[in-house]
Image (cartoon, rainbow, N blue to C red):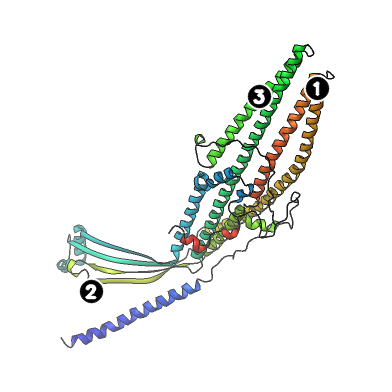
Amino acid sequence: MTGERPREATRDQPIAGACGTRLLFLLALAAWLTLAGGCAVGPNYRRPSAPTPQVFKEPPPEGWKQAQPNAGVPRGKWWEIYNDRQLNALEEQVSISNQNVLMAAAQYREARDTVKIARSGLFPTATASASLTREQSSGTLGKNAVAAAGSGASAVSSSGAVSTLYDLSADVSYQVDVWGNIRRNLTASYANAQASAADLENARLSFQAELAEFYFELHGFDGDIDLLQRTAKAYEEYLKLTQDRFELGVASGLDVAQAKTQLDTTRAQLIDIGVQRAQMEHAIAILIGKPPAEVTIPPMVLKTPPPPVPTGVPSALLERRPDIAAAERQMAAANEQIGIAKAAFFPSLLLSATGGFESTSSSQWFTWPSRFWAVGPQLAETLFDAGKRRAQLDLERTAYDATVANYRQSVLTAFQQVEDNLAALRILEQEAAATDAAVADAHDQLSISTDQYKAGIVTYLQVITAQTVALQNEKSAVDILTRRMTASVLLIEALGGGWDASQLPTRTEILASGK
């Protein structure tokens, strides 16, 4: 007994040493390949150029000042520049209750979760399993095996034997990121999450601007209603004038009929505007996420022109528009997909290890002799795929080109929108001054025509003509002021609403969100 133990130890030592050597070799290989994975295949991302003018073609309206590069629309609550408490209260509800904004917020949360899924690829995957199997081997197979082996094998045959297998094992596998495809997938996920965050801000800005636009249009209808009410009241006085003159015999029944027609026509226009105002009020209710029955906006007549909006320099627009930021992040994500497609041309390396306890006896299940283990790398390479990987690489390059075109088009559209609304504000300001003069002239014409009619110099048709001209000019003045207010809202939207790309979530913020 004492002499056998040294012989067993001598016999086992070379085996243990060989296993340890192989294990150390595999660990060293894994460490080297992991470090080698720092060099990822594929292009590094650089933001493509976009057509950017030095200055805007349209100068700001008179009295407006060019903002410094970092100045612009007030951050966040840009609508407060209008100093309207009712508008402020409505705008606060867009981010909370607008269903389209809430949908964009949910999509951003989905993008964050996608980042966390992609990040899990950087770490090993570990699984564990336990099983208890009761089995009986095939009696036919056992008899055939005995017959083939000869009569001497019958003693060791286990034909039809019933056995129980106890198994407890754990598996660890790790995809080595040799070519950087896992890290590129994670980078693309980060970029997509940032693009989704920019889409959320763009949706919020879009619906906030739409609400302000509808709000001023609604009060523009209030201005029309106020004008028509005042006009109808004046026409009632003209109708009484013609009736009195008719009773005195100095006017014909035609004058009375014309005055009555003018009054009834104005009343009909007044009723019709009520329909448009009601529909605009309903649209505002939907924007703040409420049924129309729950929203009532008191009438208000617009009287003051829009406040000045700092425009900044054109180059700053690329950082201030959330839709441009989203398009740029989509380019970055598409660039990473090219690297992932290139990595498919190289072999993949999987490191795996498994171990546990296995026995046919429950009493020996967790004993040291029942242990088993296996460890080793697996290298896999696609030898033939009929051009699939080449086509995938071409597809990703084409998709990247599409995102570049989309980015540049977004930039061009942004400049167009800014120029359009700068032009609108400048021209409408001039038109408002000319219309105000026309209103004053029309009132003078109406006053003179009325005096001449009372003196019997002209017919009542001359008065009606002057009334029509005065009403048209006053309505134009109301409509121009409404258009100036909505154009200022659209300019703020075109300038990004005070947002800039520095507000995009960082990688740390994306991973920390939702914890």
Q: Nearer the viewer, mark 2 or mark 3?
A: 3
**Image spot of residue 504 (x, y percent):** 56, 58
**Depth order, front residue of 323/76:** 76
In 3D space, how far apart are the residues under numbered discs 2 and 3 (Cα atoms)? 102 Å
Q: Nearer the viewer, mark 2 or mark 1?
A: 1
Q: Name the residue that disc number 3 marks.
A: 267
The secondary structure type at the circle numbered 3 is helix
In 3D space, how far apart are the residues under numbered discs 1 and 3 (Cα atoms)? 21 Å
Q: Name the residue that disc number 2 marks.
A: 369
Which sits earlier in the primary sequence, circle 1 or circle 3?
Answer: 3
- List the single residue furthest toward the right: 457
Name the residue type under label 2. Pro
Q: Residue 349 lies in what quarter of the image?
A: bottom left
Name the residue type under label 3. Arg
Identify whether 167 is placed above or below 421: below
Name the residue rendered at 61%, 49% in the picture. Answer: 80
Q: Name the residue that disc number 1 marks.
A: 462
The 10 Å Cα crowd at callout 3, few under 14, some 14 to 19, many 20 or more, is some
> From this viewpoint, is residue 361 visible?
no
The 10 Å Cα crowd at callout 2, few under 14, some 14 to 19, many 20 or more, is few
Which sits earlier in the primary sequence, circle 2 or circle 1?
Answer: 2
**Depth order, front residue of 426/146:** 426
The secondary structure type at the circle numbered 2 is helix
